[in-house]
Image (cartoon, rainbow, N blue to C red):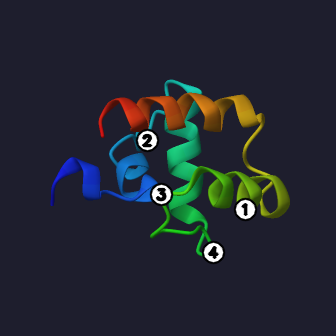
Amino acid sequence: MRKSDRSFYNWLMTNRNSMAANEVQQFANNAFLDSSFPKQSSDFDELSQYLEENTTYLMSMTTFDEAWSLYNAER
């Protein structure tokens, strides 16, 4: 799979860390436990809307924005 073919979720899972040293890692850990997370999506608006309307584990959308920037940098 080319990096550009990765969904956001697939990329995010590469950031899981049991020690969760930063907010993106904590986000990844929590998304892993979220069975409704849109795992196939690479669409910013779809993901943002899902996170805003359906989750309580993301303390700030700034964390998603940071993760999205990192994701795009690797695409």
**What numbered label is drawn on residue 42?**
3
The residue sitting at the left extreme is 1
x, y (%) of residue 46?
66, 61
The residue under label 4 is 36
Which residue is drawn at the image coordinates 60% and 50% (left, top)? 44
Of the residues tagged 1 and 2, which is closer to the observer?
Answer: 1
x, y (%) of residue 36?
63, 74
Helix, strand or loop under label 1: helix
- Which of pointers 1 and 4 lies earlier in the amino acid sequence? 4
* The N terminus: image quadrant: bottom left
The residue under label 2 is 18
Which residue is drawn at the image coordinates 59% and 53% (left, top)? 30
The residue under label 1 is 50
Q: CA distance from mark 1 to mark 4?
A: 9 Å
- Which of pointers 1 and 3 lies earlier in the amino acid sequence? 3
x, y (%) of residue 39?
48, 68
- Which of pointers 1 and 2 lies earlier in the amino acid sequence? 2
Kind of residue at badge 4: Ser
Q: CA distance from mark 1 to mark 2?
A: 24 Å
So how many labels did they put on this image? 4
